[in-house]
Amino acid sequence: MTASELVGETDESAGQATESPVRPASDDSVVVVDGLRKSFGSGGGAVTAVDGVSLAIERGSVVGFLGPNGAGKTTLIKSILGMVIPDEGEVRIDGVDARASPRAAYADVDAMLEGARNDYWRLTVRENLRYFATVSGVDPDSVTARHDRLLERLDLAGKADVAVRDLSRGMKQKVSLASVLAGGASVLFLDEPTLGLDVESSRTLQRELRRLVAEEDLTVILSSHNMDVVETVCDRVVIMSEGRVIADDTVDALLRTDDSHRLELTSVDFDDALRAALTERPAVVRTESLERGGRIELRADSDELYALFADLDERGVRLDDIKSVDRDLETAFFDLTGIDGPDL
Amino acid sequence: MTADEPGFEPAGGSDTEPADRTTPRRAGYRHLMRAVLYREYLVFVRYPANAVGGIVVALFFFALLFYGGRMVAGRALTDSIEGIIVGYFLWTLSVGAYSSISNDIGSEVQWGTLERHVMTPFGFAPVALLKGVAKLVRTFLTSALILAVMLVMTGTALSLNVFTVVTVATLTVVSVLGLGFAAGGITVLYKRVGNWLNLLQFGFIVLISAPAFDFGWARLLPLAHGSALLQQAMVDGTRLWEFSVVDLGLLVGVAAGYLVGGYLVFQAATRRARQLGVLGDY
């Protein structure tokens, strides 16, 4: 099955885990992955890191890869980039078979990889930009103005002639991003770009990334543990679990994947016995004991909600507080992957 | 954008500041060579501690060998001092070339920069070869300094026809550069084996001494034949054109064979690392 043949097999209901939750390839697809599979080890100890993944990424989009540890995100990215040779499947970048013609396929691609320095710390910021522009196939003298602009954008202009090793961690991360952008590649893979950054540095990087995407017409494939990063920066999210794509849709669609209402009710009448009884109801997803009474979290459609309120009324429960709980990407992620906690 | 047309006209029309409209030019191997050599030069001049440390250690051991040997062996050592100086010079060249390229590849793996090079239009192979050239030049500079101090220390005079010495020594050390590539490839696959691979440099002493054992086949080993020619050039004053075609052909053949062999081992190890998914794991 080719990615283009996936047309018609996608699920219309946004973000639901289905057999083929992937988007079809289109004429505008710049990255097309078809049936990618990669296992490590052999025999009984073999681990399938990527299990038949097919997806297509449109030019100009920002796609986030989400998934728990070991979901296969990094292996998928490295397989797309040719740093890991897949067992099966095909990768096409801008229509070019990456296995058959890697140089041509990756001519317009660059990557910032998780846990790697990505650049040379003994060189200055500007020297890194010039070096990586050259190895990306671009004469650095012809992109000096672009480098100046990048340094301005990323607030690195004042540090242009400082060795990278003398910069803070946040700045080093920005230099990594700048060096990835230095050669003018329009397809970028960013694996955990905000890893290890403090909140402020992470937000600055997200803001600058969003701005650069708009200005440079970039296609970005981003993997992150940080839901805020994905929600802020990405147009679309691919959620992976156990090597497979279990959801592939826009952030907006994933945030409204079900019609349920989410409420948080607090009452002094929610004693241990009542909370225990309420957990039997499917609508109640969480209970919590408070100093006086307790709190329950509901996820229910209208019928279930009316039924539950009728039950509470019958039991003589007086509600002290009712809050609507917004569904965020984190909630959607937990729902889709079946993970209980925030340990992604 | 393709490799042939690396243009990236940034999209304008956003509500932010307009993007610049410069059209990038394609970089060829000339640009790559300049970039890699310039990077090596910058690192060398900015961080000379390693090079200076290497020179000091090499001279310390030579002083130990010379003065200690003179005390123990007396005239016997003094009579053969020219050969010892040439051998020691070649050994410092070999160790410098071998360890710098193998350690450098290990560092590139550790930093994640090797992975990044793999997907560029040039790949890592030409970058590694150019690094090898830079390491060779660098090692020549430091070893020349060591040679000068050794000559002054021992009061010895050698025939130093620069053209002959540089050509023969370069071709001799190229075979070791090939071993460095192979060792770098093993580091890519097995990571923290650098210390074990560095032990190989003590084997170079045997290879440099191999001509003394007069085994014909030993001339096919790295360093051995070149060592014999370098002794002739520096001790006996033989000029490059005075060597036989067979000798020069063997020197070039051994250099090319080990360089190509080491390069193929490096390529095979990199490919295996990509299959195992360990190219960037450190």
Image (cartoon, rainbow, N blue to C red):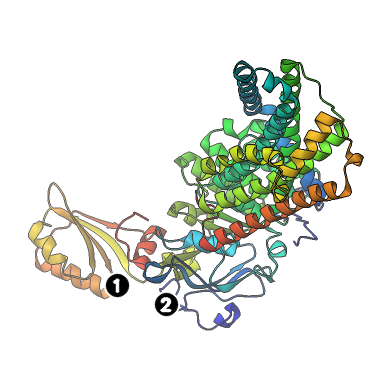
Three-letter amino acid code at the position of disc 1: Asp
Residue that appears at 68% across and 32% down:
B92
Q: Quadrant of residue A336?
A: bottom left
Quadrant of residue B68 within the rendered picture: top right
Q: Quadrant of residue B226?
A: top right
Relative to residue A113, is residue B5 depicted above or below?
Answer: below
Residue A202, given in percent of the width and then of the height, sits at: 49, 44
Q: CA distance from mark 1 to mark 2?
A: 21 Å
How crowded pointer 1 is (Cα within 10 Å; few <14, some 14-19, many 20+) is rated as some
Q: Say if residue A38 shows up in the picture.
A: yes
Dots 1 and 2 on the same chain = yes
- Are the residues flagged by discs 1 and 2 in contact, CB closer than 8 Å? no
Reading the image, the residue beneath label 2 is A18
Task: Where is residue A164? Give x, y as percent.
Answer: 61, 35
Q: Nearer the viewer, mark 1 or mark 2?
A: 2
Mark 1 sits on what residue?
Answer: A301
Please state, as top left, top right, bottom left or bottom right, where the N terminus of chain B lies in the image. Answer: bottom right
Q: Of helix, strand and loop, which one carries label 1?
A: loop
Q: Position of residue B32 (x, y in %)?
A: 77, 47
**Residue A184 appears in the picture as rendered:** no
Vertical side of B162 occupied by B181: above or below: below
Q: Secondary structure at mark 2?
A: loop
